[in-house]
Image (tube, coloured by chain):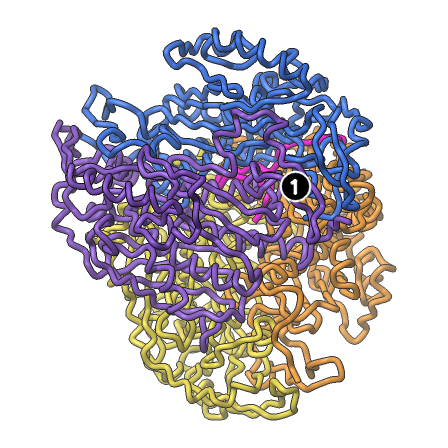
Chain colours: A orange, B yellow, C purple, D blue
Amino acid sequence: MSVNTFGRMFRVTTWGESHGPALGAVVDGCPPGVPLSSGDIQTWMEKRRPGLNRHTTQRREADEVEILSGVFEGTTTGTPIQLMIRNTDQRSKDYGDIVEKFRPGHADMTYWRKYGIRDHRGGGRSSARETAARVAAGGVARAVLAELTPGLEITGYMTAMGPWEIDRARFDRAAIGTNPFQCPDAEAAADWAEKLDGIRKSGDSVGAVVEVTASGVPTGLGAPIYGKIDADLAAALMSINAVKGVEIGEGMAAAALTGAENADEISMGPEGPEFTSNHAGGILGGITTGQDIVARMAVKPTSSILKPRRTITKFGEATEIITKGRHDPCVGIRAVPVAEAMVACVILDHFLTHRGQVGESLPGRIG
Amino acid sequence: MSVNTFGRMFRVTTWGESHGPALGAVVDGCPPGVPLSSGDIQTWMEKRRPGLNRHTTQRREADEVEILSGVFEGTTTGTPIQLMIRNTDQRSKDYGDIVEKFRPGHADMTYWRKYGIRDHRGGGRSSARETAARVAAGGVARAVLAELTPGLEITGYMTAMGPWEIDRARFDRAAIGTNPFQCPDAEAAADWAEKLDGIRKSGDSVGAVVEVTASGVPTGLGAPIYGKIDADLAAALMSINAVKGVEIGEGMAAAALTGAENADEISMGPEGPEFTSNHAGGILGGITTGQDIVARMAVKPTSSILKPRRTITKFGEATEIITKGRHDPCVGIRAVPVAEAMVACVILDHFLTHRGQVGESLPGRIG
Amino acid sequence: MSVNTFGRMFRVTTWGESHGPALGAVVDGCPPGVPLSSGDIQTWMEKRRPGLNRHTTQRREADEVEILSGVFEGTTTGTPIQLMIRNTDQRSKDYGDIVEKFRPGHADMTYWRKYGIRDHRGGGRSSARETAARVAAGGVARAVLAELTPGLEITGYMTAMGPWEIDRARFDRAAIGTNPFQCPDAEAAADWAEKLDGIRKSGDSVGAVVEVTASGVPTGLGAPIYGKIDADLAAALMSINAVKGVEIGEGMAAAALTGAENADEISMGPEGPEFTSNHAGGILGGITTGQDIVARMAVKPTSSILKPRRTITKFGEATEIITKGRHDPCVGIRAVPVAEAMVACVILDHFLTHRGQVGESLPGRIG
Amino acid sequence: MSVNTFGRMFRVTTWGESHGPALGAVVDGCPPGVPLSSGDIQTWMEKRRPGLNRHTTQRREADEVEILSGVFEGTTTGTPIQLMIRNTDQRSKDYGDIVEKFRPGHADMTYWRKYGIRDHRGGGRSSARETAARVAAGGVARAVLAELTPGLEITGYMTAMGPWEIDRARFDRAAIGTNPFQCPDAEAAADWAEKLDGIRKSGDSVGAVVEVTASGVPTGLGAPIYGKIDADLAAALMSINAVKGVEIGEGMAAAALTGAENADEISMGPEGPEFTSNHAGGILGGITTGQDIVARMAVKPTSSILKPRRTITKFGEATEIITKGRHDPCVGIRAVPVAEAMVACVILDHFLTHRGQVGESLPGRIG
């Protein structure tokens, strides 16, 4: 019932607002005996941290994660892990204008109507700052996955900024860490940098497509119906701020294929089944095939922009709004580590759920 | 934890296999005092029933829903409603070939590896026949919504079959019920009929895009984080067989917009806020705005085709497979009422959840 | 959120009313590959079946369980198991008097006020007939436990009928199956038979204490806080109709002990830790010790009696009521297999949950 | 699935260990618009605080609750409320002896075996210190109940210390706050004080019975089967450390009654139905009657005592243990506010769940 929790066995509950004293996540159901330090988590926090370069918000947050429980002498105990991140650089006065005006395209109005109270400073609970807690929880998930499924790797990157897509022919995993866009196409990244400067200067913002690939995923995770791992990935990614579309494998493009084109043909390789292609994105019938999981999401442009938009106030009066604050001209950039974190949590959750129901090995052999 | 249940307050658990004696759904959490008969449900079942025209599987199922509990003298009692549908036209021998071969693009192999046992007749639990239970549950949800939010309307239709999209300029709601594709563009529908004949005759299949619109949705349903109504819609739609992508409002196309373009500007109308556009698809920050909810999903082409594909057997031997059975050349057609049913369940679930947490009215006034 | 479901990983959802066409349970999360037939379940149904002897209701129900899904060729598939039991001997006219009168001590009035609609025939959903579905689900749990933890045995029996308790010195497990009370003290059983004849003839009813022992329980099941196995047992037993008290080990009597008396001292035996006593009832800190789990519940006397009691009608008028129908003079008798079933489900649920979080072995060694 | 969470709509997740930096609770699902300050919560914390008198542990904790989220300008926002309590007076060296020895009657051994790692300082997660977080969460529940059901009062008190019970004829609600035992029988309290001095000096401990009464409870809360409010109360109370038995109304004594004795006869009063007695403890068929809810629990004597007990070490060696630390000779005393808090949370949870499913009023009228 909780609307601030996700996961079945590896459960993450986040809490906190953009401009309160702190925010964080409680991770419940974590296996015991896993080495974990705040440093392990900090690695991932760094990728999402604001202010890393000129393309992201200039809010300065150390985003230091304190582990308040669930870890004893460097090892998880199997009890809830509380991860707390203090807010240090709130500048609430930036939001004065939003107290009584609703930003078009933002949660301001729906939030107000639903609850009748709203922490207008930075959007309160609907701020993307909540995603810091997800990345912290994802760090825990990754530490556990490293123990349980060594070899599993989760990699996120941008495949489009606004209308500008990467060229898949230039896809180079090594390029991802070398540019501010986590872009696997270095040429596109250089182009985007320039484009984004222009957008930022014009007071506008732009959307993005983020793709996450997980390789080394065990076969057999998921379930046929409402526990499909792709259904859980869809919810997990759609729950990220500003996401409006989610795809697995071919995604929306699957609609245009024929059955013959779409079928990933199977052959027997030295270490098990092999596939001629991966239209399925690593998931068939809700269960992992052992191929790479490929998930994609579209992030809309942030609605906090300097261009004036027509709107109304709480009192129903017509007005205009521009949002000063310190916002990301392309939130897709910082959404990459968030998407990775969600994928990590979902995979681990299914790993534990599968182990619970079926046990530690796959009963269905081939050959 | 259940992987065969969805919903928080209005909970649907489905059960049953394609070729077992029966399948169905238990609906828990239904409000009491709602008029409900099996006839109310049957209306929706008709739209999904196989064999209605030459474009769908020729399996003949009456799909009659028996209400075994939860309704007394024509009214819901607030206790679990068991909806049972008997299977009557299983023709299991069609599936002889699948006992030991895995269909590419189908759940056969993943299912086998995970569980080590598989009802190969018609795919067992992974058959799209499970969706009959969803439509039945959706019928209950619609009956409740008719009581609680009169005026709410949920309409599904196909917007693309394979690479052939509708022309939005010809969008005509009245056309939807007049063609086998539930297509709002009568011209496209005529074209698709011809195209699909060709595809069927060639032993192949084709994907589709299905869109569902809900109008008259109350403002304030949903929650800011993991209880976003769009996250639940994404999971609900992605959980439908063969779905590979889910979109809300602009969907994947939102990535290409600027913030200024994407913002739906707000003005004050006689009955509350009005918007200049609906890029948001009726949802901002996970909460409904009162505008139409617009959700879309891509259905891949069915993998049960007559064209031979290379695959392996349970014993790891290379082989070829063609799937005889009686399959839909375009499962998107029958996915329309399924998508509608899922949207109905999600909206009702959020209605009840909102009422539980916040009460019967919206605390945040405008004006 | 479901109020008709229990369990985390092994989830049981029951449905159906006393006088509807059928009732049953959906069991979700069952491990695959477990041999299961309806005969396995029927064994346990027999113990609860009405009309077995003169001490229970004379309603005649075959209580035959149909497995509608989740089992293929005699083996569980890992998908939902639907267990359906048809009602065959409803005699609704017996309940004419209850349509407008509320039985004191019964759910009649609360049910009516909450829902505003009530299947008065036999109490609808609040009838103890619902417990048939629990016993069926418990049969599934037992079949799974037989595979996963061979040697585990769950035994229920009555330790008191009304004010008449067994003599623990005469406790003889072999006696349990030899009398209608499932009483381990044959002498007490003989006495109770006579006493109950008198109570029945006087048109009254009487309460009982039921104890369930589980031996061969693996160490380590449960969790320290809200997932304590004793907390789940307490909820499971208290959810049985007419139960007003639940005890683990010493139960309420623990309050009167000193710490020195209550501590079960530990020594090292050939196969692991041994204890000098079992005040704890096999559970410490919410986690199983490996000793026998001992749980107890008090069943109140049924409120459907032939002695007239003062009450009111739906219209608020003062009246008297006697309940004809066919009722158990001591519902405790038939509560024994129900309590066993609940204990079986809870233990299996914790087994699977533990396996999910911690894996297949206990990490903490002794010695 | 979470084993550190309870509640359906009003969900409480606790975290933290006895000797970590902090512990706390996240409260999710709280209605918006409720006035709440840390002072409101502190009131209840005071009742549980250690070291208030010579009868409780001499550990000195301020138990100050910080509200880190979910409250804005003195009002709940409807988003998760993080309640944090810093640990300040850990004296971990007291526990040196426990690192390798298992206290009989304590979670030490089960915890170790399950997780293979254990924060031995003060019992880690299995310490009763966790209950501070429950009292804080209960403070939130009370604030909400004060808004939603003014007039509802929840009162806990001890009815027995060890074998010494109160005399119900001397029951005086006003006496409860005037003695360290929260005892409604002032004479008994004076006697207990003397008795407990002796027990403490002998290095032993003693159990207790705690009763909680809730008056002014709305009719209609709960559900007929697994969502029975008494089943949830049973789980909630049994989840408190050291509790071994739970009773509603007559509790275990109900077994000894006849149906005629046990039935609370009903008449029509000026404001609705009235009852001649309250054997039911305010709950019939799992649903509240409007009478006082009466719940009771037995707290075993703490196992941390100065009397030496035989046990083993992690290495399987026979040894003796005495537990120094600073322990409560009668944990029942400080369990009173904890039990009250759990009852408050359960009632609110059912209030919200009822409102979600059924709406804001009771559909079933009488008269």
Q: Taking B220 as reference, is D201 above or below it?
A: above
Q: Where is residue A3 shown, x and y percent of the image?
A: 55, 44
Q: Residues within 10 Å of mark 1 (few under 14, many from 20)?
A: many
Q: Is residue B280 visible?
A: no
* Chain at numbered mark 1: A
D57 or D2, nearer to the observer: D57
Q: Answer with left or right where residue C137 lies relative to residue D163.
A: left
Residue under the point 76% across and 22% down: D89
Q: Where is residue B179 shown, x and y percent of the image?
A: 35, 76
- Give the secondary structure at mark 1: loop
Q: Is residue B99 visible?
A: yes
| Span shown in magenta | D1-25
Residue under the point 73% across and 31% down: D122
Q: Taking A267 as reference, is B188 above or below it?
A: above
Does the segment drawn in magenta span residue D5?
yes
Does the segment drawn in magenta span residue D131?
no
Residue where numbered disc 1 is placed: A127
A77 or B343, nearer to the observer: A77
Q: Where is residue D292 shown, x and y percent of the image?
A: 36, 24
Q: Answer with left or right where residue D45 lies relative to residue C61.
A: right
Q: Taking D162 as reference, is C20 above or below it?
A: below
Q: Answer with left or right where residue B111 lies relative to residue A187.
A: left
Q: Where is residue A151 shown, x and y percent of the image?
A: 79, 66
Residue type of the residue flagged with mark 1:
Ser
A95 or C310, nearer to the observer: C310
